[in-house]
Image (cartoon, rainbow, N blue to C red):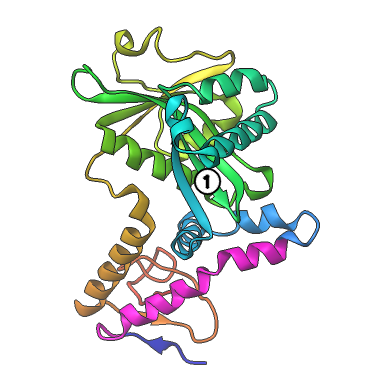
Amino acid sequence: APPVALTAHNVPARLEELERRALPVQEGQQEAARRPGGGEAAARDVPSLEREQGLCAEEHAGDLRFQVLRGGATSAAAGGGALLALLLYCDLVNAQLPSMTLKYITKLVLRSDHRSVVCTRGGRVAGGVTYRPFVHGEPDGGFAELTFCVVRSDTQVRGLGTRLMNHLKAQLVGLGCNSLLTYADESALGFFLQQGFTDSVSLPAARYSGRVKEYDHGRMMQCELHKEMPYTRLPHCIGTARRRAMSEWVASGGGVRVAAGGAKKRARPGTGRCGGGEPGPLELR
């Protein structure tokens, strides 16, 4: 079949159609998960942006909820539901981090100076993060310590950890924090690097030494936060920017075509079909 020609008039609608193909991520993952050993492999094949877009759709529909909960008297005042959610979250942390006792985890999560972003799906705790902000009297903006970051085993590699981190970053920016610190376990370094962390800590040690908890076999890492960044709306913003850039490129005379009924190779504008040779049209998946 001949390629479908795109123009500046119809490229946004066509790109939205292409993105909608990838949006039903959850249905595809659930079907793959029914096959032995297939769920995680299938999830890894889905690009990270599409994974988070699927979670955004769940969140918009009300199937996925993110709550900011505090320990101490605040959780008691909020009612039994908040306290129960925190206790169920503590059980999840203990299951994912068995080297820590449930008593230690619960004591930390329920402290009045700690907060948690707890994610629930269908009334079941699916993941969460616990943090401690340092904002009062801090020069050059506050910072925060990330204590726990866990996701249920059956929902890992599906973008929920990234979604949790984006909600956390949005909360911290609202509190006036511009840095997030954590002691990362060696097995989680890849995840934290993907979330913008680095082991080149620029925050002066005098500001966090003795305040941020240290753990054996962990590595201190820092993530810089930016108040201009729409963390919880990143998938939408990136998708919009991508469509706008494509529309502008087509309007400027760039050749674009999509192979009807199937995917062809993707080329960069002005580089030819596979990054070499004479400039050619861009073929989109």
The kind of residue on which mark 1 rests is Cys
Residue 12 painted magenta: yes
In the image, the segment drawn in magenta is 7-32
Q: Position of residue 107 (x, y in %)?
A: 56, 19
Rendered image quadrant of residue 236: bottom left
Q: Position of residue 85 (x, y in %)?
A: 56, 39
Question: Which SS class for mark 1?
Answer: strand
Q: Position of residue 76 (x, y in %)?
A: 48, 31
Rendered image quadrant of residue 179: top left
State the predominant SS element of the stretch in magenta: helix
**Which residue is drawn at the image coordinates 40% and 68% (left, top)?**
267
Rendered image quadrant of residue 142: top left
The residue nearer to you, when weighing 140 against 37, is 140
Res 227 seen here: yes
The reply, left or right, for residue 285 in relation to residue 28 is left
**Which residue is drawn at the image coordinates 68% and 48% (left, top)?**
154
Q: What residue is pinned by disc 1?
A: 119
Does 95 appear above or below 112? below
**Which residue is drawn at the image coordinates 19% and 18% (left, top)?**
139
Residue 160 painted magenta: no
The residue nearer to you, when weighing 25 against 60, is 60
The number of numbered discs placed on residues in the rendered structure image is 1
**Which residue is drawn at the image coordinates 31% and 59% (left, top)?**
237
